[in-house]
Amino acid sequence: MDKKYSKEEIYQKICEILTEEFEIEQTKIKDDANLFTDLDLDSIDAVDMAVRLQQFTDKRISPEEFKQIKTVKDVVEAVYKLV
């Protein structure tokens, strides 16, 4: 799938994953929300999220880049760079 997604489309997909897979309230999901302290994800959740995003984009976030991701906005930016 070589579709170019907008940042808004990526953000919407991330929100969908966070609410459906991790049962996080939509109101908690903001650009600057920290995945670990604000949204209570752990490292296994983060890996699960990366897998879901890989399925969405057909591209993989590198482990080095993955370690730099802290906020929802960081996830959007990392995925946007891939597509």
Image (cartoon, rainbow, N blue to C red):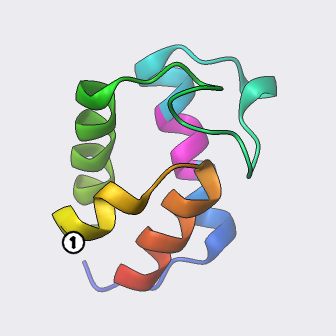
Q: Is residue 40 visible?
A: yes
In the rendered image, residue 36, in percent from the top left (x then y), is placed at 50, 30
Q: Is residue 32 left or right of residue 17?
A: right
Q: Quadrant of the N terminus?
A: bottom left
Q: Quadrant of the C terminus?
A: bottom left
Vertical position of residue 16 compared to residue 40: above or below: below
Q: Is residue 19 magenta?
A: no
Secondary element type, mark 1:
loop
Q: Quadrant of residue 81?
A: bottom left
Q: Quadrant of residue 15?
A: top right
In the rendered image, residue 6, in percent from the top left (x then y), is placed at 61, 78
Q: Is residue 83 visible?
A: no
Residue placed most toward the observer, 58 or 60: 60
In the rendered image, residue 27, in percent from the top left (x then y), is placed at 81, 25
The residue sitting at 52% across, 30% down in the picture is 18
Residue placed most toward the observer, 46 or 13: 46
The residue sitting at 60% across, 18% down in the picture is 24
Main SS type for the magenta part?
A: helix
Q: Is residue 60 left or right of residue 3?
A: left
Number of disc labels: 1
Residues in magenta, as a range: 13-17
Residue identified by numbered label 1 = 59
The residue sitting at 52% across, 19% down in the picture is 40
Mark 1 neighbour class, 10 Å CA radius: few under 14, some 14 to 19, many 20 or more: some
In the rendered image, residue 63, in percent from the top left (x then y), is placed at 18, 62
Q: Is residue 23 left or right of residue 60?
A: right
Q: Quadrant of residue 49?
A: top left
The residue sitting at 56% across, 24% down in the picture is 19
Given the image, on which type of amino acid does mark 1 rest? Lys
Vertical position of residue 36 compared to residue 51: above or below: above
